[in-house]
Amino acid sequence: MPRNSTTKSAAIRADVEVKTNIMGTVMATTSELSDSGAFIQSNILTELPPGTFITVQAIGFPEPMPVVEAVVVDVGKEGISIKFVM
């Protein structure tokens, strides 16, 4: 998926729990992460339209990770690009 972001990202795979008002909870995996957002791989999440607000939490760590609010900014065949809401 082409990146429209000007921030540098890293190829980081992490299991995440994504919550939406539309679909409830969906388990997925990140493939890229930056200070401002991420790309989340999921065929299910591709049904979300841009502008949808979601929450994301990394899972599988010894300590609970923070829940982060984000908005869907782009949808592709393999997943969604999100921007963190600060």
Image: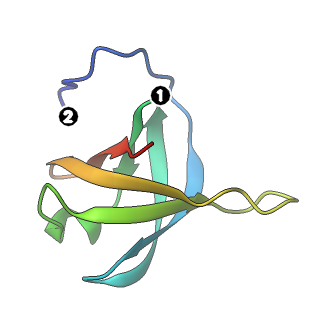
Label 1 neighbourhood size at 10 Å, few (<14), some (14-19), many (20+)? some
Q: x, y (%) of residue 49?
A: 11, 63
Distance between the Cα atoms at labels 2 and 1? 15 Å
| Residue at 19% across, 63% down | 46
Q: Is residue 1 left or right of residue 55?
A: left
Q: Mark 1 belongs to which amino acid?
A: Ser
Q: Residue furthest left?
A: 49
Q: Mark 2 and mark 1 in contact? Answer it, CB < 8 Å.
A: no
**Residue that badge 2 annotates:** 1
x 45%, y 40%: residue: 31
Report helix, strand or loop for mark 2.
loop
Along the horizontal axis of the image, is 23 left or right of 68? left
Closer to the eye: label 2 or 1? 1
The residue type indicated by label 2 comes to Met
Q: What label sits on residue 34 in the rendered view? A: 1
Q: Which comes before the other along the chain, label 2 or label 1?
A: 2
Residue 81 vertical placement versus 2 (above, below): below
Residue 60: image tag: none
Question: Which scheme is used to colour this image of the protein?
Answer: rainbow
- Judged from this view, the residue extending furthest toward the right is 62
Residue 58 sits in quarter: bottom right
Residue 4 left/right relative to 56: left
Helix, strand or loop for disc 1:
loop
The quarter of the rendered structure image containing the N terminus is: top left
